[in-house]
Image (cartoon, helix red, strand yellow):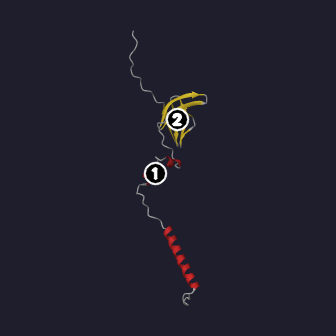
Amino acid sequence: MQLPEQLSAPKIVQALALLAALAGAMTWSLLLTSAESHTPDAPPERLAVRSDNPALQWFSNRPAQVDIKVSGVMAGARGAVAILSLNDGLPRSFLAGEALSQGVRLLSIEGDGVMIERGSEKTRLTVSKLPDSPFLPVLTRE
């Protein structure tokens, strides 16, 4: 097959290469443009407050929110021991200086409570008091 003089094989290859370069440039320009965000508009402080996901707390530098209840304190062979319940969990024993959670540490153990450090804030928690026992009648005959 004979091509006319105007359409020689080198000119066709050159035209195809030019079209391929233009197509590549168009593709890159489409890929590099920013896509429109479909996230709902919310104030930044509202997004930052949401820390109910433990994975978010791993990367946070704020102390974790931990509900601590002091069941008791006692002296042990290794020093004073505090019996604490974290987030309504089972009571466990802790020594002074132990980390209770991210950014939360048992600072000291006292005779009637403990001192907790959350970041730079210190809080004193006292031992939970048992409710008064109900009146029990005498069950023996006099």
Disc 1 marks which residue? 48
Mark 2, residues whose alpha carbon is within 10 Å: few (<14), some, or many (≥20)? some
Q: Quadrant of the C terminus?
A: top left
SS at badge 1: helix
Regarding mark 2 in the picture, which secondary structure is present there?
strand
Q: Residue at x 46, y 51 (%)?
A: 48
- At a point 56% along the width and 85% down the height, the residue shown is 11
Residue 108 location (% of width, % of height): 55, 34
* 37 lies above or below 58: below
The amino acid on which the numbered mark 2 sits, given as a three-letter code, is Met
CB contact under 8 Å: marks 2 and 1 = no
Q: Quadrant of the N terminus?
A: bottom right
Image quarter of residue 15: bottom right
* In this rendering, the label closer to the viewer, 2 or 1: 1
**Of the residues under marks 2 and 1, which one precedes in the sequence?**
1
**Image position, residue 73 (x, y; %):** 53, 29
Residue 55, given in percent of the width and then of the height, sits at 51, 48
Q: Nearer the viewer, residue 82 or 52?
A: 52
Determine which residue is flagged by label 2. Answer: 115
Question: Which x, y percent locates residue 51?
Answer: 47, 48
Image quadrant assignment for residue 109: top right
